[in-house]
Image (cartoon, rainbow, N blue to C red):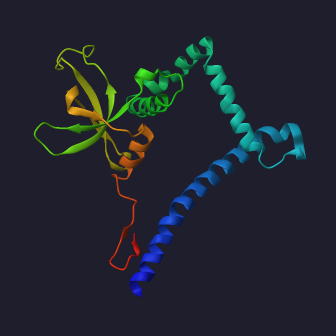
Amino acid sequence: MTKNIYQYFLRGLLTALPLGLTVYLLYIFLNWSETLAMQLIRPFIGDFYVPGMGLLLGIVCIFLLGFLVSQRGVAKLLLLVELPFTNLPVVKSIYSSFKEFAAYFSPQRKQDAQQTVVILKLPGQDLEVVGLVTRQRVDDLPAGFLQGDRVAVYLPMGYMIGGYTVFVPRDWVQPINVSVEEAMRASMFAWMSTAGKKDTAGKIQP
């Protein structure tokens, strides 16, 4: 009886936690956008303000920002705005990391530039490591790197606290049918299994 109570509680917690965190983050975003919209719009429209206009304003602003940065002149101006973020020692690393991560999902990326999820296998070893091929050639790297048919493979760490980039022969990697989003999501939680297993009584165990 005690075991069943524990299992039910754990299942309820695992069900409620992702939902609760998602709703909470959405609430924070909506509350922030509504507050900002009230400060910006209310002076012009007075009591006509309708709840939800903050979200609409945020979507419109993001769309306009995307349109503006797509223009050549504005893109050059954006480079000037980025100067403080790309030159300060600590800020530079943080900003560049976020920018490169966001740029990966850009629809303007060429198909051949897409990262590939692979299994990295060391010769003579049964060890398998999941990684992302981030570079298909090494001949344009600075002097000192080994040359040949080699690729760069990024090995993400659990909970997205970092990772390692290794340069290995191409025949050490084998592509797998997993999207980058799925691989990154699975790596975040150390590829923990979500499939239940049956006990001797036929009940699903968490």
In this rendering, would 138 be left or right of 122?
right
In the image, is residue 28 above or below residue 118?
A: below
Taking the spot 32% from the left edge, 78% from the top edge, the residue there is 200
Q: Quadrant of the C terminus?
A: bottom left
Quadrant position of residue 143: top left
| Residue 10 coordinates in the image, percent (x, y) | 44, 72
| Residue 205 coordinates in the image, percent (x, y) | 38, 72
In the image, is residue 132 above or below residue 185?
A: above
Taking the spot 41% from the left edge, 32% from the top edge, the residue there is 97
Quadrant position of residue 4: bottom left
Count all numbered tags in the image, as a single digit. Answer: 0
In this rendering, would 71 be left or right of 84?
right
| Residue 81 coordinates in the image, percent (x, y) | 55, 22
In this rendering, would 86 be left or right of 131?
right
Outermost residue to the left:
124
Quadrant position of residue 61: top right
Q: Quadrant of the N terminus?
A: bottom left
In the image, is residue 169 above or below residue 33?
A: above
Taking the spot 69% from the left edge, 26% from the top edge, the residue there is 64
- Given residues 111 and 41, the one toward you in this image is 111
In this rendering, would 71 be left or right of 145?
right
Taking the spot 66% from the left edge, 22% from the top edge, the residue there is 67
| Residue 98 coordinates in the image, percent (x, y) | 45, 34
- Given residues 33 and 62, the one toward you in this image is 62
Outermost residue to the bottom:
1
